[in-house]
Amino acid sequence: MMTTVMSCDVDVTTKRDSDKFNFSPMEKENLYEEDTESESESEETESEGDGSVTVGKYIGLEDMEEPEPEWDVDSFDGREYESDAEIRDSFANENDYMEYREERIQALEDRGFLPDPFNYIGAIQNLDGPAYGNMTNREYLAGLASMCVKKLNEVKGKTVEFDSIVRATTNAGGASWKLYITFMAREYPNGPLLEYQVKAMDFVGDSRPPFPILCRPAPKPLNHYLASEDKDTLE
């Protein structure tokens, strides 16, 4: 089990001692220092239509270390929000609980591609800032995205072409970490730009090469988070 440590007012070190990503500040009440995997899930079940949703107690979403996750398998698949009476009772009023519940459902729908402090997933804010060596965060992320695109093309016979980074999130700390990258791509030469998503894993100290997890079209633009420049990119 790896230890995840995140601070609300300093950069989070992720690769070597001198390598840092810049994350957005998180509210202190939403951050904890504990032995856990970087993503977590809730334990509370409420029937909603033909499926259940989940909010509640958090246990590791990535319950085991995955040095080489199975290709094209999303760790969020099958995760549902389940309600828990203990969690509900811990809120002073129903409105506060419902706000919390909606946030946890939305976090599951975002599947790691938007910041989620409960799950230790933070935004990489400064894409043009230094990653490590002479590489910027944008260049580092472009390399990971291109790696995942190459895997997709090889496995599924696609002709997807990487174009540009839109945004990214990552879990912080530990011997390995996952990156959730949103980028623009073309599915064939001179085709229209489309929003794509990839997940990749990287390892401390270059002990192992980065590992592709999945690559797919984004389900829909996440307009509630996109900055104005991102919206311009999508138009």
Image: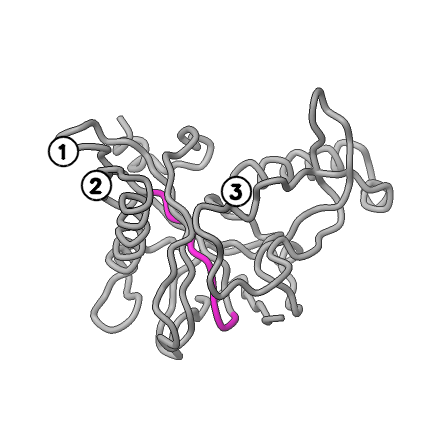
Q: Give the residue drawn at x 27%, y 39%.
A: 157
The structure residue drawn at horizontal position 27% and vertical position 43%, both measured from the top left corner, is 153
Residue 130 percent across, percent down from the top left: 28, 65
Q: Which residue is mark 3?
A: 111
Q: Which residue is mark 2?
A: 161
Asked which secondary structure carries label 2, the reply is strand
Callout 3, which amino acid?
Arg
Q: Amino acid at mark 2?
A: Glu
Secondary structure of the residue carrying numbered label 3: loop
Q: Amino acid at mark 1?
A: Pro
Nearest the eye: 233 or 96: 233
Q: Is residue 181 magenta?
A: yes
Q: Residues within 10 Å of mark 1 (few under 14, many from 20)?
A: few
- How many angstroms separate mark 1 from mark 2 (CA)? 8 Å
> Magenta stretch?
174-182
Question: Which one is earlier in the sequence, the residue at label 3 or at label 1?
Answer: 3
Q: Which residue is mark 1?
A: 189
Left or right of 5? Residue 200 is left
Dots 1 and 2: beta carbons under 8 Å? yes
Residue 221 % position (x, y): 40, 30
- Left or right relative to 167: residue 235: left
85 or 203: nearer the viewer: 203
In this rendering, the answer to whether 37 lies above or below 168 is: below
Separation of disc 3 and disc 1 at Cα?
29 Å
